[in-house]
Image: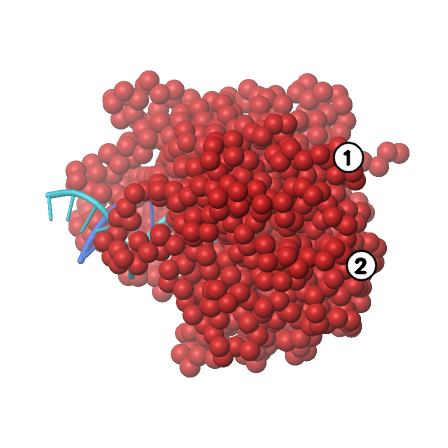
Chain colours: A red, B cyan, C blue
Amino acid sequence: MGAFRYARPAPEAPLELVARHAESYVRYLPADERELAAHVVDLPARAWTTERRVAGAANGRARVHAAAAPRPSSGWATAARGAASAEGARRARIEPAADVAAAGLLTPREADEWHFDAPPAPVPFGAALDWSTAAMAWDEPWVGDARGPEWMGTPIVAEHTLLAPVALSPRTPLSDAATPDARGAHLSACATQRAGVPASPAVAGSDSRADACARPKGGGAGGPRSGEPLWPQLPTMRAQLDASVGARAGAAGGPAHATGASGADGTRAPKRARLALAEPPAAPHGAPSAAKAALSCSVLAATGMQRIAPAHAEPSAPSAPSARASAMERTPLSAAREVAMSRAELDGARAQRWPELRAVAMQLVFSDGTSSFHGARPGAPGARVAAAALFGFGTEGEPLHAALALSEGAVSGAEDVAGARQMVVLAWGIVRSVLVSPTCLLVLPNAQLVLGALAEYAPPASPPMRPESSRLDLARIRTAAMLDPVILAWLLEPDDSSDNVSVLDARHAPQPDAAGATAPAPGACEAAWRLCDKLYAALLAAYGGERARPALNELIAREMAVVPTLARMERLGLPLDTAGLSAAAAAVDVDMESHAATARRLARKPDLNLSSPQQLAVVLWDELRLTRPGGARRGAPARSTDEPTLRRLRDELAQRVDAERPGGADGADGRGGGCAREHLALVEAVLAHRTVAKLKSTYLEPLVHLQLSDTAHAPAPTRHDGDGVPFGGAGGTRVRSRWAHTGTGTGRLASSQPNVQNIPREPYTLSALGAGAGARADGGAAVAPALHVICVRDAIVPHGGAGALLSADYSQLEVRILALLSRDAALCARLSSEADIFRTIGAAILGKPAALIDDGERAMTKKVLYALIYGLGTERLAAELKVPTARAQQLKGVLLSRFGQLRDFIDSCKNAARRNGHVRTLGGRRRPLPAIASVVDEERARAERQCVNSIVQGTAADIVKASMVLAERALAAAALGERVRLIAQIHDELLFEVVERADVPRAAAAVRRAMEGVCQDGPACLRLGARLPVKVTAGPSWGRMQPVGVARTRT
DNA sequence: CTGCTGGCTTTATGG
DNA sequence: TCCATAAAGCCA
Ligand SMILES: [Mn+2]
Ligand SMILES: [Mn+2]
């Protein structure tokens, strides 16, 4: 409740500064800004101050009422200083700590650690750049730089060289005869990729990697390695097997958890031992294994199952019932049943060893018989994993097909419950070991979904193993040897939003297998393998062929490394203050109805639907015959009723009301001032209603609803998260958003259901509540009238009273990327200063001291600056700034000429896109822009604007995605991996939940270091050679964050 | 008459 | 004729 009642201190009004600088502010500008300011010095500042209200309307109102709002009741200081001036900013770094300490809201220790020193002495931004070379060599073939940290830079498929000699099974002939290599040649041909690639120290230093990479080279496409088995011994798996089969422990094994072969650091070579299903225990290496491969299929089938009824009985769609039904029939469940063995056969098969798997494609089957569970919401009710289908290659012999039952109901080969349970446990061990093996190439369609589902999966208890201890820990997933064909397809065509493998199959595979649409039919995993192979080949060709291979592999590895992180985020969700949310929703409801009533009364239309722009347009433009506001509105539709239009209309009406007040003579033009006053009130009611309706229907209600439905059906998020740390919500509730890895053309992530990337930042003050009789008339008095400041972000609260939220947000990320990519010295210089670039540039444009640029003006400057860089037209700039076109033209020219290298870079982007038909980010990701060659001017111009934006926004996405993985690893290295969890990414911001507030300083330091250094010691291709400053904040809710400083250097 | 769908408008975020 | 998203409501 308290989350929605708090005060925002009014911003400082730096009156002294006004007095001191108003007359000669130009002299206070940096020398290089005077020229710019001279051009715009007569720009009416008024235009900006009114526009500021456009950008920050809610905020403006919130401030007005802030003084009356009660102080926060939680043990946190709201240290949000205005920081609108340089002096204010300087003070703000020092004062909050003092404030906080004085108020006694933090322990002395916290007060000491939460200090607010300025960042370290500013190194000129870009000082380490090589100014003689361009950052992006557009005309060179892309070779990238495959070096990188061990965790993501290791070429994924380098070690997997034994695929080519293995012939595909003839039993599922999916191949097109025209393709000569039906053997995964593309994936395997990378055996030679190491040649010519300088090994990074990190990679070279890793025993296992160096070993694994070096070994197969000579053989090339030759015969299978007969060398040592590569399957690592997995302690828990081993224990399971021992327990379930009752075999005596192999001599080498020892206690289950002692070896730690799958440790997270990866610096130690994994212990290699043959994986045995049962007796005889691990045979010596190199034992002849002719029978092994032959038996593999049946061994796997021995864990077979019976067909289970789909959860939803009938495919309700009447369309193509036969095709649908046959697809159902052909799930691996039924397939497995066909080959299911008798108990005797089973026992016999158990005695055989597993083949040494080198490459596997795996798909899940959910309880509904599909492999995607229809859209795949995380934690979707009833989404249970029923089975896994595998297709793989061993070191020799036939490829193997397998269907593994992961639920006891899916087992058919066993005669009793205990037997079924044993087989499920066995199957789970296999699946789990495939996932954590660093040496077995794993083709995993929809990897993020699969990982999330398997992390939820709890195998049946099989003493002495407890289910918890054999759960999948997503923090330990190795992605270096993982390939998701969905991601490959996205890398190939990022604008195609087809996340379904079957669709990809239809597009890229020679023979689309209609039946295998979503369910992994017996051939589906093999098809996935083939698809992956084809996609990789297409990708390699598109990315520049053989010499691009190492860098392409590094790119793929970097993307795959994000997958478990996203799966964890999806699984964990965001913690909610449910009570506060409900209270806010109720209050907003009353407010909204009040506005609606007002509007209907003033419009004299009791049935007016304010949510219908159509009806509103009729009222405003037809019935009331209001004149649409001037200001040469952009190409907006003539009858638009959007916010800028209504705001202009409101301002004009307000002027008329003001003008008519002194005279008092209404009725001069037939419609008196009383009319204008009513119209003004109507427009204001409409605007308020819009805002409040948006709050309610898009944010408050869905948050309440999604959270409730989740906790009702999926208890997982409030349980221990597999690592023993409780992450509940306030009241144990959380909301689980979907994180789309392949949802954008630029490489950004996208969030949905709910979207947590567009939750309103500013608080909104309910205006109707308590003000009018309306609220009281319909019983609104029962709703606490004091609850009038609504901030949705305040509903995101850490679990428990001891926690905190921690946020780390890159400062001016895209501007910095532009500066570094373009090598623009002027821009770099401006970014070197501690001063906020949007304030200084805003000051230059506005012709006033940076100290006087308020938050609204800053936001406006930011918007205009980015827009200008990305191709804002003169007309719209003029409309945006409310200045004549000529002045907009002038402003634009001056600003762009001020940063000449930047302008040249923009041009070079367009030229490169024209030549190549695509653009490429710093991380190497491609985005085709075929429209760049269009003969239609509109399309071509749009593509030209897109290409600049894609490069920069996409590069930012590369950087932030890398920083996500690096930050998680940094936290893990600081032993905070289980206490500080990433819960959201907002394009340039990472949001963490901290279980213990005392961890905030350490977590902040680790995260800051990881994020700021991505372009210095992260993946080689991203090394722009500059520190990227990050603003770290923390607080009791997402709406009340305060700065966390860098580590103090004790003197 | 009900329910679904695609296009359109609007608004929230991020850069 | 800044870019990139998600989502809600209206309407045919
Ligand atoms: Mn930022
Ligand atoms: Mn941000």
In percent of width and height, residue A668 lies at 20, 48
Q: CA distance from mark 2 to mark 1?
A: 28 Å
In the image, is A422 to the left or to the right of A441? left
Query: In the drawing, what numbered circle is on residue A210?
Result: 2
Kind of residue indicated by mark 1: Gly
x then y, percent, for residue A580: 45, 26
Tag 1's secondary structure?
loop
Q: Chain of mark 1?
A: A
- Which quarter of the figure is the C terminus of chain A placed in? top right
- Please, what secondary structure does the residue beneath circle 2 have? helix
Residue A254 is tagged as: 1
Expressed as whole percent of the image width and height from the top left, the position of residue A490 reads: 52, 62
> Which residue sits at x=59%, y=54%?
A296
Residue at x-position 44% and y-position 24%: A579
Label 2 vs label 1, nearer the camera = 1
Residue type at numbered disc 2: Ala
Q: Residues within 10 Å of mark 2 (few under 14, many from 20)?
A: some
Q: Residue at x 28, y 31 (%)?
A: A594
